[in-house]
Image (cartoon, rainbow, N blue to C red):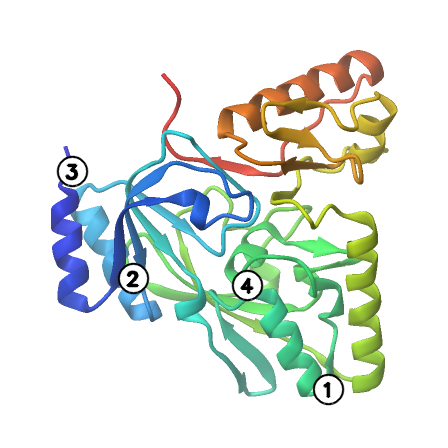
Amino acid sequence: MFDIASIERFCNEIGCEYLKNEPMSRHTTFKIGGAADLFAMPSSADMAVKLQQKCRETGTPLTVIGRGSNLLVADEGIEGCVICIGPKMSEIRNENGYLVCSAGTSLAELCRYALEHSLAGLEFAYGIPGSVGGAVYMNAGAYGGEMKDVVAFVRHVTHEGEWQERSISELNFGYRRSVYVGRDDLIVEAGFKLEEGDPTAIREKMEDLVGRRKDKQPLEYPSAGSVFKRPEGAFAGALIENCGLKGENVGGAMVSPKHAGFIVNTGGATCADVENLVGLIQKTVKTETGYDLECEIKRIGRQRL
């Protein structure tokens, strides 16, 4: 049995801010999730690595998150320590021709920095919620662009505490995946190779894509983004809509009437509500179309008994 008090003491020793029994609904874009035993907010990569190693030494369950997008947290909460690589680990700098940023940097912040420095290539990412670390982890993309198109290298710390760098050829980027999926390496920084561009054109493209998001996506409700991966030969949202599931709800979770590829929290939705609605969608789509829909959202936390 782990001793969460030992992690609390260690946070105090290294000056890491933390919250006890912190509701994860405050830290996810879905606004869903029970409490984490301890929610830690390191302010540097070195601090995050030290905490990561301490959790492993003490056998404390460890969960690493970014800014809480693309996540569904269990109603029963998260056991052990959650390390949030978020706003306190947000830094952008130029390094030998690359734009290098900390894993906790928001994509919006990174895109604005690129605009200010007349650097093109990241326009597609403007409006995608979440952090650079999370975006690299899942090769986030939209409107024809993906992280694999702009990332040059990623720096991480291994399970054994060794700092390493992977080049683009070693990242194994694919549709909503990278070499980091299924591993416990801690992503620390990412380097981007961008091209000089016209700031007016960059701004216009960013504003155009944000406008398209507002028109097509249910941004007025909490959600975790697109729920399902795109099945080969079809689009998840179209399949769901054609099955007449727009507006279908379970408790506070609803298939968005605006975009069937999204499940939104209309107020008080639980993890169980979302999971039950996902199951209903998958069963209906499979029965009526033959397609198997695979969840893109990652569920974390305790399992229901």
| Residue depicted at 78% across the width and 22% down the height | 291
Cα gap from disc 4 to disc 2, whole angstroms: 17 Å
Earlier sequence position, callout 4 versus callout 2: 2
Is residue 143 visible in the rendered image? The answer is: no
Quadrant in which the N terminus appears: top left
Q: Which residue is mark 4?
A: 132
Cα gap from disc 1 to disc 4, whole angstroms: 20 Å
Identified by mark 4, the residue type is Val
Judge by depth and name the residue closer to the eye, 285 or 241. Answer: 241
Which element is circle 3 on?
Answer: loop
Which element is circle 1 on?
Answer: loop
Quadrant in which the C terminus appears: top left
- Whether pointer 1 and pointer 4 mark residues with C-beta atoms closer than 8 Å, the reply is no
Q: Position of residue 83 (x, y in %)?
A: 34, 54
Earlier sequence position, callout 1 versus callout 4: 1
Q: Position of residue 104 (x, y in %)?
A: 47, 65
Q: Position of residue 18 (x, y in %)?
A: 26, 57
Q: Nearer the viewer, mark 4 or mark 2?
A: 4
Residue lying at the far top in this picture: please name it. Answer: 287
Q: Which residue is mark 1?
A: 118
Tell me if 200 is positioned left or right of 28 in this view. Answer: right
Identified by mark 3, the residue type is Phe
Q: Which residue is mark 2?
A: 49
Tell me if 2 is positioned left or right of 271 in this view. Answer: left
Cα gap from disc 4 to disc 3, whole angstroms: 31 Å
Query: Which mark, by number, is residue 2?
Result: 3
Tell me if 38 is positioned left or right of 300 in this view. Answer: left
